[in-house]
Image (tube, helix red, strand yellow):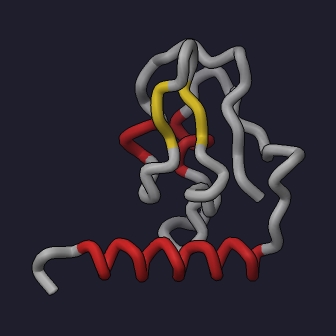
Amino acid sequence: MALMITDECINCDVCEPECPNQAISMGPEIYVIDPKRCTECVGHFDEPQCVQVCPVECIPIHPEHQETKDQLWAKYRVLQGAATAADPKD
């Protein structure tokens, strides 16, 4: 499952820096979540950090991108592998 930001977003800027997968970015009018990068913080935290900090509670599960916990773990592992491969320290 990926999360989404609804049009109730007030552009408060608190969610974007909390995302460990860099899945949140500014869209044309409000912040958006890239479902290819969103793992609902699986692999990083017990709860989605953007949901925890959102003052207007506008980050529900995206109905078109529902995934199992196993699928989220697999996505996390792929994202971490890509991050490690891109790390110039290796």
Where residue 83 appears, x then y in whole percent? 35, 72
Residue at left offset 46%, top offset 58%: 21
Name above or below for residue 34 compared with residue 15. below
- Closest to the observer, 34 or 62: 34
- Closest to the observer, 12 or 7: 7
Q: Quadrant of residue 28?
A: top right
Name above or below for residue 43 compared with residue 41. below
Where residue 72 appears, x then y in whole percent? 68, 72
Residue that sits furthest to the bottom in the current view? 90
Residue at left offset 64%, top offset 81%: 74
Residue at left offset 56%, top offset 61%: 41
Name above or below for residue 42 compared with residue 55. below
Q: Quadrant of residue 57?
A: top right
Where residue 53 appears, x then y in whole percent? 52, 36
If the image is split into quadrants, where does the N terminus sit?
bottom right
Residue that sits furthest to the right in the current view? 63
Where residue 84 appears, x then y in whole percent? 31, 80
Residue that sits furthest to the left in the current view? 89
Task: Count every numbered label the image shows and give the total.
Answer: 0
Q: Is residue 82 left or right of residue 27?
A: left
Residue at left offset 64%, top offset 21%: 56
Q: Is residue 75 left or right of residue 58?
A: left
- Closest to the observer, 46 or 9: 9
If the image is split into quadrants, where does the C terminus sit?
bottom left
Q: Is residue 86 left or right of residue 54?
A: left
Q: Is residue 52 left or right of residue 5?
A: left
